[in-house]
Structure formats: structure tokens, C-alpha cells
């Protein structure tokens, strides 16, 4: 049976990850607390019992293996009823890269993979430290498959985790060169012009175009993550590390959440920078809320996601309880909508992921044609960017993000991407500035 032990509540879960990050494949699904109040749960784990990976071109088949892996550890033990109120009771944690979405949508590749991450990497994690900031409680949760020696080690580490003040100032990570854009300004303008031609011809209504940046680096990416999360706290942040690579994600966007048969997605479409004064900030927020262009973009993606959810949800159950809500973060305001539905009895959360992936807010509409145009024009593959980081518990709960505001450190280089939705009345100069605005805080914080 699933075992639960109370832990001391802490407003900042960083020490829990610090205590276990020398174990294999550490993960932290980070609420952004205490720097932001938007997120509820922190989930920390490490030492998965098994890991599945797949390169681009083979990820779709591996989703079947993923379902089998979850079933292998779930079936013998039944539902984890003691942990019913917790988001995670042992299960899958990992990522789906954008390249997996190309496999699922049968979109041909044209651009090279710069970052060396696999298109899919998912582990079965038999334990987690969970911090619930709503109830101000924390717990260690152990799945029945967790080896006793690992359980004892984790208990000792988590109970001895240092206070945040004793972690020290993050240091030891540095860029060796500034971030450089792969796409020149001239190439960007030409690509936007080509997208506008596709839009005028009726190929699609919106295309999400992104540019790639990279820099040489040295040191520990965990220390870079600690520095950045204080500057850009986000409710769907994540830190995941492997032997060779690390993912540093500061996403504000939920992709898909499943609790019981309730499905929720919260697409972001519409972005404007924060102001330098309270008056300027309020004026910019008002401009975004009333922007005809941004509201139209958001509505296009809401319609796309209603269609995607319809592949897995009960007919007639899909609703839009929130449209064009304003959400504010450290560097930007966003327009966010909410779409809900009820999962059909013949569908699993993994089926839902496969049917909706990649998220429409980072592709455009119609999805497949927009992705074909992206593949034609973007000179570098997106790797994990615009994919998803997720968990799926053995007791059925799932949550996932859209992996935007995401950096990938693979040895001696670090990569990031920034993009935005292009529609028929887009101004190329404004779109270029928006793509920079979304990542400039990340890049400036790390630039030498």
C-alpha cells in the first residue's frame, strides 16, 4: 500500500531538490513559490525505477510503451487510495518534445536538432516529496514498488534538507559567450513575409513562429535555475536533469490537467510587456485586454483546443468557463482562457495527451498545416521547446505544462527559444520584439 509520511512544511521547496539532486534523474515540478503565489504544489523526486526515451521519428511508438510501463506498476497494487488527496502517488514524470508532436501529426522534418535531448523521456518515479502551499502541509509519498533502501535514503535526505538560507548564493554557472540568435533579423522578416503569404492564401489562420538562441556555458545548470526562478517565478516551472543534460523551464502555461474525469486546458495567447510604473503597467494591461488582434488570436486557439479535447471527451461536455482572463507575471501580462471537458470512459490521460499534442497555443491553426509551415521555415528544431513536461500518477491524476520560457543545457552549450503567433494583420517588427521580450529576462540574467 502507498505510504505517506508528514514532512515539515516549507514555503520554498528548493532545499528538497538540493537534498536529492545527486541521485539519478532528479526532477522538480516547481510551483514558483515563494516568489509567486500562483502555483499550489511542488513535486520533487529522483531515482526512477525505469526510464523510457525515444529520438525524433520514434516517439509515437514509445507512447504505447509508456502506457504499458504505467500499467505494470499500477495493476498489482490497485488505486493509491491513501494518497487520493495528493496530486502524485508514484508514477510517470518526464517530457514530450515538440518533435514527438511532429511524429503524431505526421509532419516531415527539415531542420537539424541542435539540442541533443531525446524527443521523449519519461521515468517511473516510485516516491515524491510533495509540498501543498494551499494547506501548508508537506509529505513524503512512497509507492509500494519503491525499494526499501531507496526509501530509507530519501527519508534521511529530505528530513535533513537545509533551510533555504543555507543553500548559499547560486554560483558556479556562467556563460562563456553572449546568447546569439540563429535567425538573423533579415531572415526573420523574410520568414514572417512568407507566413503572411500563406495566411493570405488561406493555408491557415495563425502560425506560431519561434527563433532559437544559444550560448557557450560552463558550470552547474542547477545554480542557473536557482538564479532564474527568483527572477521569473512561474506556476508551471520545472527542473529536470540527466547524466548529460538539464532542462530549466519557467512556464506560466498549463497544457492539460486530469482529475477524475475532469479535463482542463488553459491556453495563453496574447502577450504584452509589464510597465515601468504602476500607471504604465495598468495602461498596458488594459491595452492587452481590449486588443482586437490578441482576443482574436486567443479565440482561434480556444476553438482549436475545443476540437482537440473533443477527440477524447464526452460529446457535449466541452465548455469555456473563462475567456480572455488577464494574468500577470514578472515580465509580461498574458491573456489566458480555460477550456474544460469530461474524459470518456474509453480514453486514458495518455490518450488525451496524444490526441492534443502539441498544444495549439504554440502551433497555430489549423494545427497540422501550421506545423508544416513551421517545419519549412524555422532553421533549428525546437527540441523540448513547445513540448510538455508532465506527471501522471498511478491513481490517475495528471498535470502538464506547455514548455515555453525553457532553456536546455547540454554540456558546453545552453539553448532557448522565443516566439509568437503570426496572423494576417501582424506587424513583423512588433512580432520580432515580442519574441525577444519573452526570453530577454532569461538571457540577460545569465549573460556575462
Image (cartoon, helix red, strand yellow):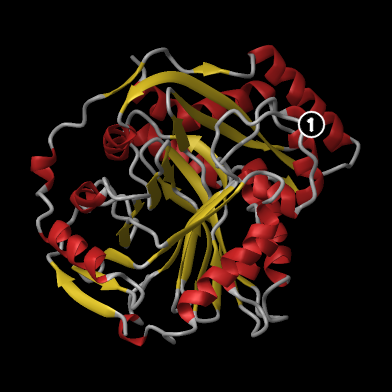
The quadrant of the rendering that contains the N terminus is bottom left
Asked which secondary structure carries label 1, the reply is helix
Answer with left or right where residue 440 lies relative to residue 269: left
Nearest the viewer among 48 and 39 is 48
Give the x, y percent position of residue 257.
51, 67
The residue positioned 64% from the left and 14% from the top of the image is 184
Compared with 245, 338 (above or below) is: below
Nearest the viewer among 97 and 144 is 144
Compared with 197, 251 (above or below) is: below
Compared with 225, 81 (above or below) is: below
> Can residue 299 be seen?
no
**Tag 1: Cα neighbours inside 10 Å, few (<14), some, or many (≥20)?**
some
Provide the residue designation for mark 1.
Answer: 376
Answer with left or right where residue 162 lies relative to residue 279: left
Give the x, y percent position of residue 42.
30, 59
Give the x, y percent position of residue 326.
47, 51
The residue positioned 64% from the left and 21% from the top of the image is 429
Nearest the viewer among 303 and 403 is 403
Give the x, y percent position of residue 148.
24, 71
The residue positioned 32% from the left and 58% from the top of the image is 45
Amino acid at each position: 500500500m502507498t505510504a505517506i509520511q508528514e514532512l515539515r512544511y516549507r514555503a520554498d521547496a528548493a532545499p528538497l531538490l538540493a537534498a536529492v539532486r545527486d541521485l539519478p534523474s532528479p526532477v522538480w515540478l516547481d510551483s514558483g513559490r515563494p516568489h509567486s503565489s500562483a502555483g499550489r504544489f511542488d513535486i520533487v523526486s529522483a531515482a526512477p525505477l525505469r526510464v523510457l526515451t525515444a529520438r525524433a521519428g520514434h516517439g509515437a511508438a514509445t507512447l504505447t510503451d509508456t502506457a504499458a510501463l504505467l500499467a505494470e506498476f499500477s495493476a498489482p497494487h490497485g488505486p493509491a487510495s491513501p494518497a487520493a488527496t495528493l496530486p502524485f502517488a508514484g508514477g510517470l514524470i518526464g517530457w514530450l518534445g515538440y518533435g514527438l508532436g511532429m511524429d503524431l501529426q505526421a509532419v516531415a522534418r527539415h531542420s537539424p536538432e541542435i539540442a541533443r535531448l531525446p524527443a521523449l523521456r519519461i521515468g517511473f518515479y516510485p516516491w515524491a516529496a510533495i509540498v501543498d502551499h494551499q494547506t501548508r502541509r508537506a509529505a513524503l509519498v512512497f509507492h509500494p514498488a519503491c525499494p526499501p533502501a531507496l526509501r530509507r535514503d530519501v527519508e534521511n535526505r529530505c528530513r535533513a534538507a537545509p533551510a533555504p538560507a543555507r543553500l548559499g548564493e547560486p554560483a558556479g554557472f556562467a556563460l562563456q559567450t553572449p546568447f546569439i540568435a540563429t535567425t538573423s533579423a533579415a531572415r526573420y522578416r523574410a520568414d514572417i513575409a512568407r507566413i503572411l503569404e500563406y495566411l493570405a492564401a488561406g493555408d491557415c489562420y495563425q502560425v506560431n513562429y519561434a527563433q532559437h538562441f544559444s550560448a557557450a556555458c560552463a558550470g552547474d545548470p542547477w545554480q542557473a535555475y536557482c538564479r532564474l526562478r527568483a527572477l521569473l517565478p512561474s506556476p508551471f516551472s520545472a527542473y529536470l536533469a540527466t547524466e548529460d543534460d538539464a532542462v530549466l523551464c519557467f512556464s506560466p502555461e498549463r497544457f492539460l490537467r486530469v482529475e477524475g474525469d475532469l479535463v482542463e486546458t488553459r491556453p495563453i495567447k496574447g502577450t504584452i510587456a509589464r510597465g515601468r510604473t504602476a500607471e504604465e503597467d495598468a495602461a498596458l494591461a488594459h491595452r492587452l485586454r481590449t486588443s482586437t488582434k490578441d482576443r482574436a488570436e486567443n479565440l482561434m486557439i480556444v476553438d482549436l483546443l475545443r476540437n482537440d479535447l473533443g477527440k477524447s471527451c464526452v460529446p457535449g461536455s466541452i465548455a469555456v468557463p473563462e475567456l480572455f482572463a488577464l494574468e500577470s507575471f514578472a515580465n509580461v501580462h498574458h491573456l489566458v482562457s480555460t477550456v474544460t471537458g469530461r474524459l470518456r470512459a474509453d480514453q486514458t490521460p495518455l490518450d488525451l495527451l496524444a490526441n492534443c499534442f502539441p498544444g495549439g497555443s504554440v502551433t497555430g491553426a489549423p494545427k497540422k498545416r501550421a506545423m508544416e509551415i513551421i517545419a519549412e521555415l524555422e532553421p533549428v528544431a525546437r527540441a523540448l521547446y513547445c513540448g510538455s513536461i508532465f506527471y501522471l500518477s498511478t491513481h490517475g491524476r495528471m498535470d502538464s505544462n506547455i514548455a515555453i520560457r525553457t532553456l536546455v543545457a547540454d554540456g558546453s552549450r545552453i539553448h532557448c527559444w522565443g516566439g509568437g503567433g503570426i496572423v494576417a494583420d501582424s506587424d513583423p517588427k512588433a512580432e520580432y520584439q515580442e519574441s525577444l521580450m519573452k526570453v530577454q529576462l532569461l538571457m540577460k540574467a545569465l549573460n556575462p
